[in-house]
Image (cartoon, helix red, strand yellow):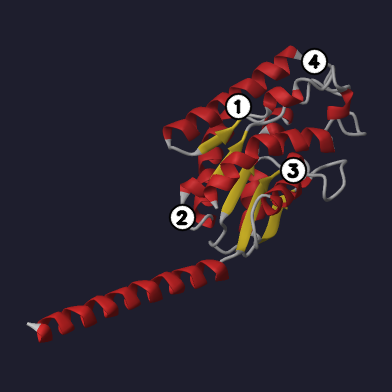
Amino acid sequence: MKFLFYLFSIAVILLLSCTSTNKVLKNEAKSQNNNYNILSLGDSYTIGESVCETCRFPEQLKDSLSNNTKDTSFNLKIVATTGWTTTNLLNGISNENLPNNYDLVTLLIGVNNQYQGKDFSIYEKEFPELVDIAITKAKGDKKRVIVVSIPDYTYTPFGKENTTISSEIDTYNAFAENYCNANNITFVNITDITRNGLEDTDLVASDGLHPSKKAYSLFVERLLPYALEKL
């Protein structure tokens, strides 16, 4: 009987030891995975036309994530150029040798389709393609993707509150939001922030057209809770 009790005790000790070792290994693995990669895809609103490099929203988001997490570092890659349409972005991505290991991917695209008078059917075809690419780059996990709504540039000195253009931007945003909702992809609306640009001129950059650092900071306030959930 004593021998059986002895064997039982040894088995318990070994089990606890293995469990403890597994926990240590998991914690060590977690501590080694403190380097997060962010990919931001888009156009002038992503590259931050007319604002400083650290003022654009992907940079501010990276800094906010760093400030809200412990012992972590964040690497940011931006694929965006002022004036890019969905077609341009698709081509731009194909010219990059991007890995499929990003922990977070943001996508903000479409304003230049509208501005350049492209047929809406192009956006209907290419926006889903870009979302699929974003998912692929995000380790194949759509939960790591955030789609951002298109700002409304009519609420600027350049746009002069053109209601027709605003309505067209609404159409683009509605399509993107409906697509994201149907496919369980995070969609964050920041358009209403930019529609305060004529009342609060600090929301508009010095060029009288693009969002300012302040506007991008407000974008990040919306994005940050969703981004933190994805890490």
Q: Are marks 1 and 3 in contact (CB under 8 Å)?
A: no
Q: Secondary structure at mark 2?
A: loop
Q: Which residue is mark 1?
A: 172
For label 1, the crowd category at 10 Å Cα-Cα, with few meaning under 14, some 14 to 19 and many 20 or more, is many
For label 3, the crowd category at 10 Å Cα-Cα, with few meaning under 14, some 14 to 19 and many 20 or more, is many
For label 2, the crowd category at 10 Å Cα-Cα, with few meaning under 14, some 14 to 19 and many 20 or more, is some
Q: Residue visible at 62% across and 43% down? A: 107
**Residue 171 position by quadrant:** top right
Measure the C-alpha gap from mark 4 to mark 3.
24 Å
Q: Residue visible at 73% across and 29% down? A: 115
Q: Which residue is mark 3?
A: 57
- Find residue 219 and name its label: none
Q: Secondary structure at mark 3?
A: helix
Nearest-to-viewer mark from 3 and 2: 3
Measure the C-alpha gap from mark 1 to mark 3.
21 Å
Tag 3: amino acid = Phe
Can I make out residue 152 in this image? Answer: no
Nearest-to-viewer mark from 1 and 3: 3
Q: Which residue is mark 2?
A: 140
Quadrant of the image for the N terminus? bottom left
Q: Which residue is mark 4?
A: 161
Please state the horizontal and vertical placement of residue 131, each as a whole percent of the image: 53, 44
Measure the C-alpha gap from mark 2 to mark 4.
40 Å
Tag 4: amino acid = Glu
- Identify the mark nearer the N-term, 4 or 3: 3
Left or right: where does residue 174 sit relative to residue 45? Answer: left
